[in-house]
Amino acid sequence: MKALVYHGVGKITLEERPTPTLVEPTDAIVKVTKTTICGTDLHILKGDVATCHPGRILGHEGVGVIEAVGLSVSTFKPGDRVLISCITACGRCAYCRKGMYSHCTTGGWILGNVIDGAQAEFVRIPHADTSLYPLPQGADEEALVMLSDILPTGFECGVLNGKIEPGATVAIVGAGPIGLAALLTAQFYAPSAIIMIDLDDNRLAVSKQFGATATLNSADGSVVEQVKRLTEGRGVDTAIEAVGIPVTFNLCEDIVAPGGVIANIGVHGVKVDLHLERLWSQNVTITTRLVDTASTPMLLKTVQSGKLAPKQLITHRFKLKQILEAYDTFGKAATTKALKVIIET
Amino acid sequence: MKALVYHGVGKITLEERPTPTLVEPTDAIVKVTKTTICGTDLHILKGDVATCHPGRILGHEGVGVIEAVGLSVSTFKPGDRVLISCITACGRCAYCRKGMYSHCTTGGWILGNVIDGAQAEFVRIPHADTSLYPLPQGADEEALVMLSDILPTGFECGVLNGKIEPGATVAIVGAGPIGLAALLTAQFYAPSAIIMIDLDDNRLAVSKQFGATATLNSADGSVVEQVKRLTEGRGVDTAIEAVGIPVTFNLCEDIVAPGGVIANIGVHGVKVDLHLERLWSQNVTITTRLVDTASTPMLLKTVQSGKLAPKQLITHRFKLKQILEAYDTFGKAATTKALKVIIET
Amino acid sequence: MKALVYHGVGKITLEERPTPTLVEPTDAIVKVTKTTICGTDLHILKGDVATCHPGRILGHEGVGVIEAVGLSVSTFKPGDRVLISCITACGRCAYCRKGMYSHCTTGGWILGNVIDGAQAEFVRIPHADTSLYPLPQGADEEALVMLSDILPTGFECGVLNGKIEPGATVAIVGAGPIGLAALLTAQFYAPSAIIMIDLDDNRLAVSKQFGATATLNSADGSVVEQVKRLTEGRGVDTAIEAVGIPVTFNLCEDIVAPGGVIANIGVHGVKVDLHLERLWSQNVTITTRLVDTASTPMLLKTVQSGKLAPKQLITHRFKLKQILEAYDTFGKAATTKALKVIIET
Amino acid sequence: MKALVYHGVGKITLEERPTPTLVEPTDAIVKVTKTTICGTDLHILKGDVATCHPGRILGHEGVGVIEAVGLSVSTFKPGDRVLISCITACGRCAYCRKGMYSHCTTGGWILGNVIDGAQAEFVRIPHADTSLYPLPQGADEEALVMLSDILPTGFECGVLNGKIEPGATVAIVGAGPIGLAALLTAQFYAPSAIIMIDLDDNRLAVSKQFGATATLNSADGSVVEQVKRLTEGRGVDTAIEAVGIPVTFNLCEDIVAPGGVIANIGVHGVKVDLHLERLWSQNVTITTRLVDTASTPMLLKTVQSGKLAPKQLITHRFKLKQILEAYDTFGKAATTKALKVIIET
């Protein structure tokens, strides 16, 4: 089969690889119909993800059709259309028991990282019963590819952890795909204000279309004052960090209201300053989270009922044979204005 | 009346001051019968608390008897025995409405800080209806002085924010009065382990008597490994920071389990390093809080029913005329082994 | 001043009454600009509310302007535009401290019940600081009259108690004003389905306009099966009872899914059958609540930000001198299609 | 092997049956070392449990040793000592995903009900990975038999659903084994009062030993007044129903405070009267629950750390060959004073 393979820093190729086969009785083999590229894949390409070794097929998102299932798989049978979760969950360990699938002792984020991934014609999914989701009748496959990772990530790490409530004020720092996913799902809770902050005017314009009540370009240096002015001097109830660098985390510390939450989504490479000399008395909560995809069944329902329209995140479409071009387009988002790309196999 | 007055860095005197009188219709004048000294008072003495100016009567803890009440005070009448809360709450503003009294727009921590305090024969209490609590019949006054600040602080900032649950593992970094208050109230929730960490062997010995399941002296440098060993390699579900310096906060970052909470109680003077490059994916929660004393009614019930014995925190007793000696004893805790001192007026 | 006075079962008159004056230092006198009629007023008229004696001025809803305030009222001054809460709260008692204003020991639902109410030119509001809310700049007074009672009732008793979540399924039994208030505020949480059930086709048609995803007329006897069919056989996650009679409560018991909630809003006059022989093992929760209006500040924000449009509940408008006609119109809702009526003073 | 078999109303025999074998790849065969008898077994004997047909081996509690495991069982291997949960959970269905194992679509309470149970030398456990728990090193097997059903039932249905908090007041109606299990686990949360109510003075005396702060014999007809007197006229924050008949449920309705919870544990055979004509405005919550045993891992930790001593529930011990005598003793609890009996195989 054809697969996108990582060969060390900066090197990926589309090449022929053996079709995967069942290894454990809990495995399924999925014929991938649509996949996408994640910001994390770019991190791998930069060599930032130590667990991902050369030779690995990348990709942890997609939808497809069950090709084969192991002996103990009871939820799926060949021919079933499925959504692939970026998180593999055994459903048995102490972490899985409390819905913290991200830390599953034999799973977590392994797909396209420590085992071969979904940017290929076929993929082996361990713990299939608890790592795949049936596609609803008549579902739009493209839309649902967004539910493999980006929407549960924005929702769980940003919105749920951020404890967004009706009437509340929210700021999202970073209007990339993940910040936009938080923006879309924040609207489940009817906040009175969602302020999007970014350096890229195009992404801010997109944010407006996606439901932001205000947008601020952080280039001009007065963002803190502007957020305060938009919130009667208080700051925001929820500040969502969707970039992953010290300056954006510090901005969140500056704009969170007393009693508020800083919900971190960003993947950070270095430590940040936590200004406890000021925040110790501000009754704030700071959260971190690797997505658990525990909300996937719920998100499927919101898509099916029209409360969430994930398709608007898709800006480009490619065939699998064009995947290197897709990587290029996605990697140069500032000029291509790419958000999410769909790759059809 | 006699009062302990702050006169700038390092200078306090016991002197004669006019007895306070009612200013607002919501005020009460309380004849103080017992008060105590807080670690925060020592911070003021060092000049760390910018809002506290020379000339201020210190003290934000105590019990006493109502001497006079303003026109609109309906809960208390002269002669009533009351507990003074360290936090003044109007009960009306948006923060008070959600129980976040610490940020009351006309209150918060003002007593012995921006208005005269309770280390005196009399004290004026603004917003008396919502800043004083009736002492239950037959209550032990000494015990209840511990409910003005230290016990709600340990409980709200450490235990409640730390989300301690039956069977959980807890580490408390810092076995001073506030860490011990967290230790006592953590036991409300039947955790399976409470590990106390400090540099002072005497305080660790006290911790054992107060219910710690393990004690670790952090001098030897292997505390992280020892905590891991005591928790099957996972780290603790809740790490309570009860010191207020970078090294202890960092220790909490090192020992918190995936999915766990770092509940900060410590008053910090400088920023700390937050290792998001490691913690971003660990599903941890970090909380800060200035005590709200919203739990005071509940704590009174636990004392009355014998579930909490605050008196064991008291190591020394003085008369008001000896208050300078009391400050000296409390300030030299390492040698005097002082925890909390009672000052009788 | 003119006031609508209750004189025993079935008898109300519009008559001249002395203008109220300040009694307690915590009182305010409000010049009522707009008021409305509640289903509870009709209950009083039928003699169902034993606490309401003849001679009482009715009405517990409205907006107005502060005319005078007692000595200790600090939030308001004459000339301020205010929203009147149907619930009077002292802000000091144990119930108020936990936001359960409905059971305030010196308040609760007393307005137009045990003290004179708001269907008059002026009304005395006890505990004004915690029982009135400032109207935002530029607010639409008519819209905000809906926030005195009906919207917080639908929201707190139905939606909040019903624990509605994104993607969930909801049924609301009763499409009168209170059921419609629940329908409007349920949409704060993006449920995937809201099924409205009533006997009145006009109200069901209104429900559709207000956002119901399905409507069922309970006349035909197959409602339970239809709800099951709409929910994949499971029943609904939340069933809201918004009528107050045994048959509608029993319907909720029949349609609630395992793990679901029955949130009762209805004012019941007789006991109901609780089928524990079937429900004991169904992990259901049943809640009751007299509205606390603790959510009023939040609801004000959702109105100001356009997330909630309460004005659509208003079907008729009258002057105070026409209030008997207004009662007639509101009382004959089946023929007049009245939902809420506005009475301008 | 020897097994206790149900043969229709009132008829059980100890007889020879084929040793069970693996059927599904997710099965385990457990050699039972200790089992017990549940009140539900007596219900079966009376013919109250329609799903349990003649020929069934009874019993849903016990500890044992793994004899064999199916191909996909990964948590256990032959020789492992395990705790059997009364609830079988697949870990995959929508209910299991949210921890509501009681309603697992291919499990729930099936053991000793719709499939053969644990009052035998061997038992087949479906979905073994998620329906068995490893016994901790050095665990007391007798104590842990209490964790198969009775302790999670008392804890989840009574204590957790009852939202017991430090300082709260609790009444438990029914001091049989299940009420006592609630009593033991209620103490995890340091309530200020736990009032036990029963007709049997022996059980009330046991309750005192187990930590009740007050006991009331409901025979004398003044229980409601006595509860009110013990709670300053308010009633209790949590009323736990641990009997399962109308009169005890009604008692809970009479003693619950405004804002309180009635947590039903009892298995009811007939409907009860719910007095909504009084309770509609009392802000109460009523919960039902079939135990999920989701708390089993936590309860194991509390036992291991000495916070819970389940062994005190055991009053009698028998060998498997004496099981008919054990049933007799357990069935005549009023005279034998039996709480839980241990049956050793």
Image (spheres, coloured by chain):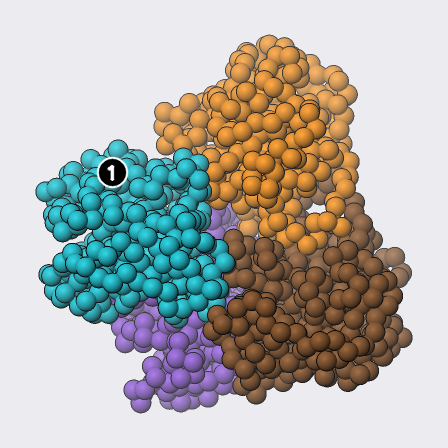
Chain colours: A orange, B brown, C cyan, D purple
SS at circle 1:
helix
Image-based side of D43 in relation to D76, left or right = left
Residue A115 appears in view: no
In the displayed structure, would residue B259 be above or below residue B2? above
Q: Quadrant of the C terminus of chain B?
A: bottom right
On what subunit does the disc labeled 1 rest? C
- Give how far across and how far down residue D154 sits, in percent: 45, 69
Residue of label 1 = C207
- Give how far across and how far down residue C283 sits, in percent: 38, 57
Q: Residue at x 68, y 54 (%)?
A: A281
Q: Quadrant of the N terminus of chain B?
A: bottom right
Q: Residue at x 62, y 74 (%)?
A: B21
Report crowding for label 1: few under 14, some 14 to 19, many 20 or more residues within 10 A (C-alpha).
Answer: many
Of residue C104 and residue B155, the one placed in the foreground of this image is C104
Q: Residue at x 77, y 58 (%)?
A: B49
In the displayed structure, would residue D153 be above or below residue A35? below
In the displayed structure, would residue A302 be above or below residue D184? above
Of residue A1 and residue D319, the one placed in the foreground of this image is A1
Image-based side of B171 in relation to A111, left or right = right
